Image (cartoon, grey):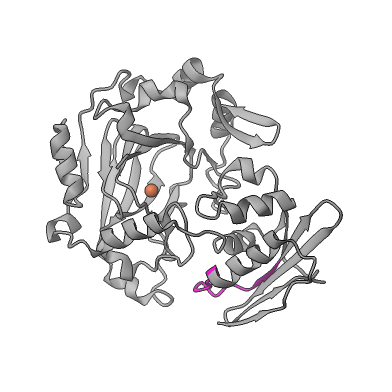
Amino acid sequence: MTLAHTPPSKDCPAAITALADFIRHGFENPDAISGCVQFNIPGNRQAYPLAISFSPAKLTIQHDWLEHTDATLTLPLNTAEYIVNNITEVDFRDPEIMGTIDLDGHLDLINHVAKSLLRPTEDTRARLEQAEQLDTPAYALTDIPRVSNPPELDILESIAASQPMIITALDMRAPHHHWSLERLEADYGDVPLRVRSADQKETVAAFIQRVRSADLENDRIIEGHTKAYTEGCFLPEPMHKDFIPNHFTQDDYIEPQIWLGSVPVNVPASSLHHDPMDGFLYQIMGRKKLIMYAPNQAPYLYPMKAYNNYQPCWVKPEAPDYQRYPHYAKARGIEVVLNPGELLVQPAGWFHAVYCLDSPTFSVSYFLRH
Ligand SMILES: [Fe+2]
């Protein structure tokens, strides 16, 4: 891909120059998409332009207004500053960031550019590279064992061997069969779940209303924008006691996240990616299907160059394109159905794409502290 980059004017704020540099070094286009995305960045006194035009052969970055654009993204200068200063942790699914940004036109083109605005920490990069070099045993590529209530030591050994397992019997304060949308609403309806915009917090009850009216026929769903799905926002503190299994102690876990909602079965609830930490996925309502690949399958899965907290892949297991991604034909994956009440133990670096087999589904995930 060739690059044309017109330099910014002298008074261009440093954050916008940095934004342009991150796009220049992080942009990839293996899906051969074309389009023009106009950034409109209001500062104190004036609005600054940044225009990104791309085709399969060329990326053009201009500090200018375009006559024709396919999509416009208006973000305040302080949001641009926040993104460049927090490039290793920014999450564009986070409504707290999205609440400050106005989007117009083709959202998928904006998503495509936003993919280049992420960078891993050295620690994240090292953990993923280390996992990819592990010699996963051959049996781990074909089968994930189901184990009833194993001791903690067995769980740690399985993680150390980079071997996922599914724990089938869990000792929970409120077992999975206690839970329904009605029960969640009754017990936790008033709990703030996530921020929808600067001045609007969405409660569990308000979110459940959206889940009930989700349009499951709509397969033009755009991640972070139109899914009736919590997208892994943090599990509210009051809910920890019911949804964190009694393995290890609370101090051993970080970042419990909630994955509640309705997503059409043919749309990934989470598209193919891998995480740098050893993780757990506890399934509470409905079934989820996971397509998993050992970390050493990375060369066949086309991981993205730009990423931060987790590394997504270009290939889509639900719609494989072997012409664009020929190595994907060599990938050896495992399909797993996680039933309510089961807990998936997922060692660092294992790739996974997640699909909702039922509506609604409810899972909680968390990572093991190292
Ligand atoms: Fe994940």
Quadrant containing the C terminus is top left
Residue 279 screen position, x and y as percent: 31, 43
Magenta segment boundaries in residue numbering = 26-37
Nearer to me, 264 or 58: 58
Lateral position of residue 261 relative to residue 80, left or right: left
- Judging depth in this view, the residue of 369 and 213 nearest the camera is 369
Can you say whether 124 is above or below 254 in the image? below
Q: Position of residue 83 (x, y in %)?
A: 61, 53
Q: Farthest right residue? A: 45
- Residue at 72% from the left image edge and 69% from the top image edge: 51
State the residue in front, 43 or 143: 43
On-image quarter of the N terminus:
bottom right
Q: Where, by quadrant of the figure, is residue 334 drawn? A: bottom left
- Name the residue at 70% across, 62% down: 14
317 over 285 or under it: above or below: below
Q: Indicate the position of residue 74 as horizontal and vertical percent values.
A: 74, 54
Q: Is residue 16 visible?
A: yes
Residue 144 visible in this rendered orientation of the protein: no
Residue at the spot 60% in from the left edge and 47% down from the top edge: 225
Q: Main secondary structure of the magenta part?
A: loop
